Amino acid sequence: MSGIHPKVLHAQDTNSYQQPWKKLHFVVGRRGKHELMAVGGRWDPCDGAHPEQDPKVLVRTAARTFMEASGVDLSKCTKW
């Protein structure tokens, strides 16, 4: 896999290979009965200044769009 550091694919024991998909964690939503979708959305001025000026705006964007998709409020999360 191009661009992935070798230590990412190995456990503490360098002889023990771990499948890359076991290292990936993300949330998907369900649209309809048989369709999955990525949870997320576009930055909006209601989230704050432009993300290039304040990277924390992306956290607020993620919390807002996740709330819209799931009803779960992540705005109080302190570790991202």
Image (spheres, grey):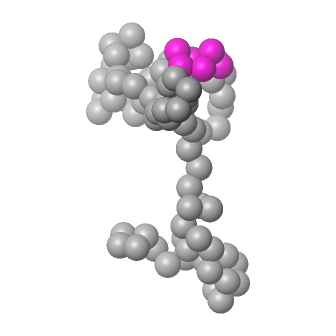
- Where residue 41 appears, as percent x and y from the top left, is 39, 25
Determine the residue positioned at 56% across, 74% down. Answer: 9
At x 62%, y 74%, the residue is: 18
Q: Where does residue 80 sit, x and y in percent of width and height?
A: 59, 39
Compared with 21, 67 (above or below) is above
* Left or right, 71 with reference to 66: right
Identity of the residue drawn at 65% across and 19% down = 72
The residue furthest bottom is: 15
| Image coordinates for residue 63, horizontal then vertical, percent | 54, 23
54 or 33, which lies in front? 33
Q: How many marks?
A: 0
Q: Is residue 5 above or below residue 55?
A: below
Closest to the observer: 1 or 62?
Answer: 1
Can residue 33 be seen from the camera position used here?
yes
The residue depicted at 49 percent of the width and 78 percent of the height is 6
Residue 56 in view here:
no
Magenta region: which residues? Answer: 67-72
Can you tell which quarter of the image residue 67 is in? top right
Tell whether position 71 is magenta.
Answer: yes
Prevailing SS of the magenta stretch: helix
